[in-house]
Structure formats: C-alpha cells, structure tokens
C-alpha cells in the first residue's frame, strides 16, 4: 500500500526516514545522497548508520522501487514544510531540547509568548522559563520522565517570561526518537492561556460565591430560563414558605399561580414589561402563598440577562419575606408610639445628648439632639438642636465632667445639682445610649427647685425657730420680752403669763384662767385701739405672722409702747385655731426712733440746702469750663491767625516791595531790573496761593476736581519723581494691589498728598532707610468703620510707610493741627499733614497714623471705592503757542469781581475768542436764555443775584443742553459743586491760576 507522506506527522516522518535508511542499507545503497535534505535532528541516526554499515550494500540501487524514490522526495519536501510551520506558528511556543533539557531550537512563537529570542535561549536549560518553585522540585525532570514513560506529558501551569512576569500555559512535552528508537531529545509545545485561566478562576469563584450565597441567604433565590420556562429554586423556598423542592413544579406558571389573585395580573404585567422591554432590573411587592395556605408579604427583585440581540434569555432574582419585617416594624412603631406617648406626657424631662470632647479627650460641650415637651417646661428654655454653651457659655464645669464621664465609661450617674445659668436645681439620671463611639447619653431629670427651696426654707425656718427659741429665752432672761400669750381662737380665751399681765395691768389669776379679747384691749390707749383690732382681724383672716406696736396702760397709770409679735395657725379647712405670741418693750426704741426722726429732719433740711449749694457750684464750674473752652478756641484761632499773619506778611512784603521797586525803576527808566522784581512778586504770589490751598484743604473747603482715577497707575507714574525728591540714600518700594478698585478723587491733590508724605518720611530718616508705598482694597465692617470714623463700605487704602524715627503718642495727637511741626524753625510750615487730612475728609475718606518710636511711621489714606472705569488720573496740558493758536468761538464770562472779568477778557481776547461778560447770575442767565451763540460758559461759583454759578449753569443747560462750563473759584461751595456732582462738559479751575493754565483749559474744553 502506498503511503501519503504529506499527511504524516513529524514523528511519523522521522520513523519513515529511519525505515527507508534501513531498506537502502539492506540494498547496499549509500543513503546519504538520497537523504541530503533530511533535517538536522535525524543526523545522529545517519552517523550511527555510517559507523555500523550492514554487509549487504551493493547491486540494489537500480532495482529500488519508484515508490521508494517518491517517498524520499516527499520526505524532503515534508521536512521543509515542517520547518516553515515550526517558524510560522507564532501562537504556539515550540521548543526543542536534547535529552538533558538543553534547548536546541526555539521558534518565533516561543519568542512571541516568552520574550526571549532563539539566540538567547539556544544552549540554555529549559528550566529557564519554569517558575522557581518548579525548578526547586525539578518539575522539568519529572515531566521528561513522564513523557518517556507515557509517550507524552500534558500539563497546565505557571511559566516565566523574560520580564519576570508569570503566564499560565497549556503544555505538551513529547520525546523524539530516531528510526532505531534511540532517544534524541524532547519537543515542548506551549500556548498562553492566562486570560482563559483567570476567567475560569473568576467564574469558579463567582459560582462558588453564588452557591454559598444561595445557601446562606434567607431569601428564596430563583433562576428562570425564559426560553424553556424552567425555574430553579434554592433551599430557602422550603425554609421560608414550606414548599419542598421535590414537589415544586419547575415552570414559571407555578410561581405565578402562587401569587395572590388580587396581585397576580399586576405582577404579570410588571415583570413582562421589563422582560419584553429594554430594562434589566425589576422590583415589585406582592403576596405569595405558603404551603399552609397563608400569604407572605414579598419584596421580589430580579435581573434580566439578554443575548447579543437584546432578547431576554434568563432572569435571576430573590424573594424577600417582608412579613416578619413588617410585623417587627409595626411592633417597633407601636413601641415607639408608646414610648413617645410616655415621653410626651410624663412630667419628667427627657433628652438625648451628644457630648463633645476636645483633642485631649476632655468634655467641653454637649448638644441636645432630642427632647420631650417636659424638657422646655423643666429647663425653662428650648435647647433642641443646640449646644448648651450657646445658651449658657458660663455653665459650671461640673455638668461637662458628669456627662462626659457617663459618655466615656458607660457608668450611669444619679445626682442633684444647681445650674446657675438656668437658675434651677435638677435631679438628674444619666445613662449612655447607642454606639459608645458616638458619645451619646440619655438624660432624665426633674426640676426640683421648689422642693430644694422648700427644704431650704424649712431648714432656714427650723434654724430660725431654734434661734428664736434661744432668742426668746435670752430675751426673757434679759427682760427684752416682757410677756407671752396664747389665744385659743375658737373659744376666744387668752392665757397669759405674769409679764403680760403686768404689762396690761391685768389680774394674773384671770390671765391663767383665761381672758377675752375685750378684757385684753381694755387697757390699750384709745388712739391705738381701733388700729389694734383691725390688725388682729386681718391676721386672723389670712393667718401667718403678726406684728403690731401700740400703747398700753400699766399699773402705774402711764402708757408704754409695746410690740406684739405672734402667729395665727389655721386648720386644713382654713379655720383659725390658735394665736400665740410675745410682748416686747419698745419704749426705749420708740424714744430713740423719735430722736432719730428729729435728726433725720434736720439732716434733710441740711441736704436741701446742700443740693442748692452744689447746684450753684456746678453752675459756676460749667461757666468756668465754657470760658476755658472759649479761651482755648481763641488761643487756637490766635495760633492760626498768628501763623497766617506771619506767613502772609512775609509774602505781602515780597509782593509789595517788588511792585514798589518796579514802579521806581520804571520811573527811573531802568527797565533791565523789571523782570527780576516781577519774578519775585509772582513767586511770592504763588506761595501765597499754595498757602491758601493748604488752609482750604485743612478746612475741607478747597476746590476739588474729582474724577475716576486708577491709583496704581498714578502711584507708578510718580515713582521717578519721588525717588529724585527723597534722594539716593533712601530705597523706594511700591506695592500695587492686583485688581485695585478705582477712586473718585482729585488726582493732582492726591499726588501732592503722596509727595508730601514721602518728603516727611525722608526728613524722618536722615541716615537713609526705606519708603514703601502700598495700595489695597479694604472692606470696613460697621465695627471697623466706627473705629476709623468712616461709614461702613468698600474703600481703597494708600499707605506710605518709612523706617524712620517714629512719633510719640503726644506728637501723633497733634500731627494734624495747623502750623504744628517738629522740624526746626524755617524748615516746615506745619500745614502739610493738616492739608492731607482736610483733602481726605473732603474726598469722603480718612487718614490714620500708625507709628512707634524707633521703628517708623505708616500714614494710610482711605478713599471710597468708585464703581465704574477709571482713567489714568492725570492729563497733559499742551501749553505751547502752537496749540493755543487759531482759537475761535464765543465765551460768556460771569464774575462779580471786575478785575477778574478784566483779566479774563484781556487774556482770552488776545487769543482770538469772541467774549461776552456779565456781573451777576441774573444777567448771565438772560444771556444764556437768549439766542446769542455761546460755546463756553466761564463763571464764578459764588455770584450775587439769587443764584450761584452752578445753579445758573444748570438753568442755562435747560435751554442749551450740553453747554460746556468752566467754574473758577477760590472757595469750594460744597453745596453748589460737591465732590463728584459735576456733569459731563463741566470742569473746575481754582483761583488764583496761571494765565497759560487758563488758556490751555479753555482751549481743551472748546476742542473737546
């Protein structure tokens, strides 16, 4: 029979090669040329054949059947195909080893699976890809021995990759033999099955957990195969509902049939809505019939499993028996209702308290989580949901320690204690409740204040009674009490002792037998008798203590003052029973009291005259104080006017002297010196203007031109000027707050304030130092605002801080006073800080000083926030002749001062403007209401005629909307202008002003 070599396995091919070699050997033919393509692993057999040739080796080659030749060719081709298969099977790791397990060949699949290349593994032991545990037990050796015994060895186990990771592989080890059956080595085939292995383990674990859960749960777990309508139940079906699994119909119809008829249709619809829809979970409640015919309340939950097409194929769920739970819930509700009813109705206060502990585990507070209505009645306050320290921050430490001890140790506590914050006594029983870690306790307490007060009153009463007994005894012995009585009210009989009888001038024998009230009061002074009877009747009616003073006639015929003290006791029905008491001789006391009354009257008369004398003296002191204040005012005014007079006299001397010399030189024809004197006069005039500006700033009446300003940009723009001013020995640092709010402020005045503060800081640091200018946004609360003397709100602050000598408290107190200075004579006017203070106050802000001697000073200006966009805060005036050239337009000038109108007419007329003038508001308004063309209104603020300049301009704008207006003033009428009330097209120019400034401002407004 012909053999199909291409269908042979590698082992079969090796055996076929060995058989062919034997045939060729017997025929006397050298097998080498015919088998030149035999693989390397067959070479040992060929070498063995060469070493042991057979005796029949010739004459047979020509007679070799053609089938044998074809077999040899097929064998060679099969070897080539096997090599190709060996190298291309990358999903399988194929390893060839010799008989000792040394690797001889390693295919691409082995490299793919384990990471080592063939070059790295040839000549290495196959143990290299076995785990350390397998190497230790020589698993490879055992596997090779098993393969030799059984023909092959199959296993699944962990192996190693080159990177040290382990993988699970299914392996087969087969021995390789030659045609003579000699053992040549082994072939190991591995396939990575890690994912399948882990998935299998997970599946097994899941199945085990599912089986354990199904056995352990009290729920009846069901597994419904929707395609076969077959249901599997766990043992809980019989345990919970009594249905033996052996007798249960495994179809879904059995389950549906055991649902209560009233619930069956609803459950059928609800579960099939999930199965037939796209949802995967189902939950519903119904009644399920037990084996005994009773019904259990069921909460059923199911999960739908769908195939790749979304078709429901399986559903797994569990039935939870709610019967016991609902019975327990009902019992719990009843118990809670009973408990709640008890707590709501009992008089004892009840509360659940959460105790708070600090980091050292000491109790520091407790919160009332729950409380019954009696709690508020007993405690006098509703503390539910509140911490006790919120109500009683000074509560005694005893309460925290007592409750904390119960919460920590669980030891109950029972005590009575007084709570000062509640002003009550409490009888308390405390026990720990809930989880000990929650530190909660239950408190049951009663307000025992009345009982304690009663006990205290009883104790005091008993002590008082004891004292009274002792006092009566001592008084009797000392003679202070002169007698006692006991009146039996139902029989109206008095029994008295000897002292009483003597005091009333009565017969002692009658006193012992019993006297009537009529007999007792017979010796009472007629003027006191009615009062005595009324006092007796009143105490008998109400019961209790009795005290009354009156006069009685004794045996000597004289009347003496006595005091009767007693007590009326009533029966339970209110009937008066007894009236015991004592008599006290108060004759001497009444004499002393009479003397005291006379002395009191005399003292009152003295006091009346004393009050009059004190009132007169107080009036004199008030008048003297008012004179002192007036004197201090005049002194301050004198200081101010003296300083002004001194400075202005100096300036006026310079101005008048320069003008006289100019007049003299002109008359002499010496015109060369005119410019010098003119410059001197102008300089003095400018200094005088600066002085008036400072005074106006101090008085908060300077003319301001407030506009929205970015203070950061203004500060940065001044940095170079300030650094040049303070000199190189002082380091200047600016700190700009990000997102600084803008302020509505006169930029030039703010620049002057900053420069003045920096100059003061420089003068305070003669040896150099550091000046820091810093801005910040500040929100002042009502408390902070009150401390800063500002309205509450949003402000930006600008502070100038130095490292200079600092100021003493006394200097700080006077720092803003006009003409106050600590600088040497001639080096300071004393108006710098007063000007800054006035400017800040006039701008709606404030200035504050923080200074310490030897450490430096910080001056901080607070300005209100402006809500809007800010400009740069400065404007550049182009005063060149070119800029002023070509001026045209009509300007109305309104000013009550003729010299000012003359100046304005001449200056602006020379510039080419058409000018109209008016001397008061009435004339100015007529011109504004006429049809005369007017491009700009220049007006003083203070005008005669019934309207000020602002009012006239507003009236003019009603007929000339958008009329440009320039206010010129030397005094800021705040009611007329305000700090921020100027409208669009309105500006302010302060007198005195330079001609070029006036011209530039007019040109700017005409072109604007």
Image (cartoon, helix red, strand yellow):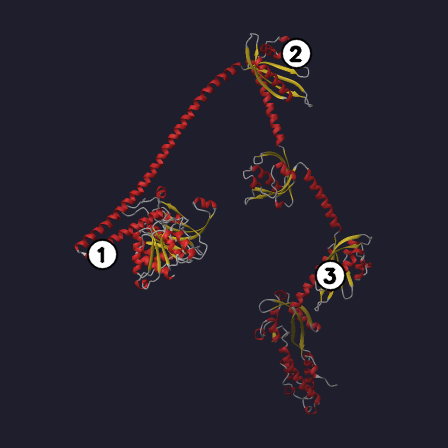
SS for callout 2: loop
Q: Which residue is mark 2?
A: 514
Question: Quadrant of the image for the N terminus?
Answer: bottom right
Q: Which residue is mark 1?
A: 675
Query: Which disc is residue 316 wearing?
Result: 3
Q: Is residue 322 above or below residue 373?
A: below
Residue 865 at x, y = what percent?
44, 52
User: What residue is rendered at 61% in x and 18% in y?
Assistant: 534
One can see residue 157 in this view: no
Q: Nearer the viewer, residue 83 or 173?
A: 83
Q: What is the C-alpha distance between the residues marked 2 and 3? A: 107 Å
SS for callout 3: strand
Q: Is residue 333 above or below residue 518?
A: below
User: What residue is rendered at 43% in x and 26% in y?
Assistant: 611
Q: Nearer the viewer, mark 2 or mark 3?
A: 2
Q: Earlier in the sequence, mark 3 or mark 1?
A: 3
Q: Earlier in the sequence, mark 2 or mark 3?
A: 3
Q: Residues within 10 Å of mark 3 (few under 14, many from 20)?
A: some
Q: Nearer the viewer, residue 338 or 874?
A: 874
Residue 398 at x, y = what percent?
57, 37
Q: What is the C-alpha distance between the residues marked 1 and 2? A: 132 Å
Left or right of 661: which side holds 690? right
Residue 930 at x, y = what percent?
39, 57
Q: Is residue 863 above or below residue 111?
A: above
Question: Quadrant of the image for the C terminus?
Answer: bottom left
């Amino acid at each position: 029979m012909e053999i199909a070599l291409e269908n042979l396995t590698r082992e079969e091919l090796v055996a076929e090669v060995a058989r062919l070699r034997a045939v060729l050997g017997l025929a006397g033919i050298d097998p080498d040329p015919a088998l030149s393509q035999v693989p390397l692993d067959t070479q040992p057999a060929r070498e063995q054949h060469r070493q042991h040739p057979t005796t029949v080796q010739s004459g047979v080659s020509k007679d070799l059947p053609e089938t044998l030749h074809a077999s040899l060719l097929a064998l060679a081709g099969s070897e080539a195909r096997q090599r190709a298969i060996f190298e291309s099977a990358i999903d399988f790791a194929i390893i060839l080893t010799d008989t000792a397990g040394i690797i001889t060949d390693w295919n691409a699949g082995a490299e793919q699976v384990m990471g080592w290349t063939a070059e790295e593994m040839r000549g290495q032991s196959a143990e290299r890809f076995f785990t350390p545990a397998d190497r230790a037990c020589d698993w490879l050796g055992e596997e090779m021995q098993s393969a030799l015994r059984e023909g092959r060895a199959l296993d699944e186990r962990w192996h190693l990759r080159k990177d040290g990771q382990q993988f699970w592989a299914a392996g087969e080890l087969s021995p390789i033999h030659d045609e003579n059956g000699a053992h040549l080595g082994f072939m190991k085939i591995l396939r990575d099955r890690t994912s399948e292995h882990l998935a299998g383990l997970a599946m097994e674990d899941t199945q085990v957990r599912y089986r354990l859960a199904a056995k352990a749960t009290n729920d009846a777990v069901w597994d419904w195969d929707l395609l076969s309508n077959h249901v599997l139940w766990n043992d809980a079906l019989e345990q919970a509902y009594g249905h033996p699994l052996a007798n249960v119909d495994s179809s879904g119809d059995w389950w549906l049939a055991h649902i209560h008829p009233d619930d069956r249709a609803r459950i059928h619809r609800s579960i099939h809505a999930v199965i037939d829809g796209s949802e995967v979970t189902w939950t519903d409640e119904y009644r399920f019939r037990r084996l005994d015919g009773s019904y259990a309340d069921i909460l059923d939950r199911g999960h739908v499993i769908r195939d790749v097409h979304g078709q429901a194929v399986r559903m797994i769920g569990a039935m939870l028996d709610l019967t016991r739970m609902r019975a327990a819930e009902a019992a719990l509700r009843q118990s809670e209702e009973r408990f709640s009813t008890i707590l709501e109705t009992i008089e004892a206060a009840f509360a659940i308290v959460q105790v708070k502990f600090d980091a050292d585990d000491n109790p520091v507070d407790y919160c009332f989580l729950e409380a019954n209505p009696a709690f508020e009645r007993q405690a006098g306050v509703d503390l539910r949901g509140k911490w006790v320290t919120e109500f009683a921050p000074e509560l005694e430490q005893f309460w925290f320690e007592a409750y904390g001890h119960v919460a920590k140790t669980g030891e109950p506590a029972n005590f009575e204690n007084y709570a000062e914050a509640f002003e009550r006594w409490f009888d308390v029983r405390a026990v720990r409740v809930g989880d000990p870690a929650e530190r909660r306790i239950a408190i049951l307490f009663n307000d025992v204040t009345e009982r304690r007060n009663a006990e205290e009153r009883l104790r005091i009463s008993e002590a008082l009674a004891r004292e009274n007994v002792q006092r009566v005894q001592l008084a009797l012995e000392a003679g202070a009490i002169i007698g006692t009585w006991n009146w039996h009210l139902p029989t109206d009989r008095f029994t008295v002792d000897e002292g009483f009888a003597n005091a009333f001038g009565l017969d002692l024998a009658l006193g012992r037998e019993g006297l009537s009230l009529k007999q007792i009061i017979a010796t009472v002074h007629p003027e006191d008798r009615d009062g005595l009877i009324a006092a007796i009747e009143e105490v008998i009616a109400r019961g209790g203590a009795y005290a009354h003073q009156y006069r009685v006639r004794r045996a000597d015929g004289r009347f003496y003052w006595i005091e009767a003290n007693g007590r009326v006791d009533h029966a339970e029905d209110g009937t008066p029973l007894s009236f015991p008491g004592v008599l006290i001789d108060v004759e001497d006391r009444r004499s002393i009291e009479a003397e005291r009354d006379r002395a009191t009257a005399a003292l009152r008369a003295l006091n009346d005259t004393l009050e009059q004398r004190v009132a007169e003296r107080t009036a004199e002191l008030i008048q003297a104080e008012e004179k002192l204040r007036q004197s201090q005012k005049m002194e301050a005014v004198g200081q101010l006017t003296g300083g002004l007079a001194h400075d202005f006299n100096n300036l006026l001397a310079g101005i008048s002297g320069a003008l006289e010399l100019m007049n003299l030189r002109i008359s002499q024809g010496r015109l060369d010196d005119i410019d010098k004197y003119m410059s001197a006069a102008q300089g003095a005039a400018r200094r005088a203007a600066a002085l008036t500006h400072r005074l106006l700033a101090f008085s908060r009446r300077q003319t301001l031109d407030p506009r929205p300003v970015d203070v950061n940009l203004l500060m940065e723009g001044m940095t170079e000027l300030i650094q040049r001013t303070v000199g190189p020995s002082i380091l200047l640092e600016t700190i700009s707050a990000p997102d600084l709010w803008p302020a509505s402020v006169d930029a030039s005045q703010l620049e002057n304030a900053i420069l003045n503060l920096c100059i003061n800081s420089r003068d305070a640091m003669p040896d150099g130092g550091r000046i820091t200018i810093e801005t910040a946004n500040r929100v002042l609360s009502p408390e902070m605002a009150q401390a800063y003397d500002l309205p509450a709100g949003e402000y930006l602050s600008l502070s100038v801080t130095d490292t200079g000598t600092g100021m003493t408290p006394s200097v700080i107190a006077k720092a803003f006073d006009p003409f106050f200075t600590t600088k040497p004579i001639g080096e300071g006017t004393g108006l710098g800080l007063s000007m800054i203070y006035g400017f800040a106050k006039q701008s709606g802000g404030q200035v504050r000083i923080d200074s310490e001697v030897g450490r430096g000073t910080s001056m901080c200006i607070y300005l209100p926030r402006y809500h809007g966009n800010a400009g740069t805060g400065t404007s550049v005036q182009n005063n060149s002749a070119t800029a002023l050239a070509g001026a045209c337009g009509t300007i109305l000038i309104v000013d009550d001062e003729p010299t000012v109108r003359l100046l304005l007419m001449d200056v602006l007329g020379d510039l080419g403007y058409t000018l109209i003038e008016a001397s008061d508001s009435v004339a100015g308004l007529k011109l504004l209401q006429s049809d005369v063309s007017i491009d700009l209104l220049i007006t003083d603020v203070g005008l005669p005629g019934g309207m000020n300049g602002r009012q006239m301009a507003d009236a003019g704008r009603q007929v000339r909307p958008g009329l440009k207006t320039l206010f010129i003033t030397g005094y800021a009428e705040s009611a007329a202008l305000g700090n921020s009330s100027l409208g669009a097209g309105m500006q302010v120019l302060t007198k005195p002003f330079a001609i070029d400034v006036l011209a530039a401002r007019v040109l700017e407004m005409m072109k604007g």
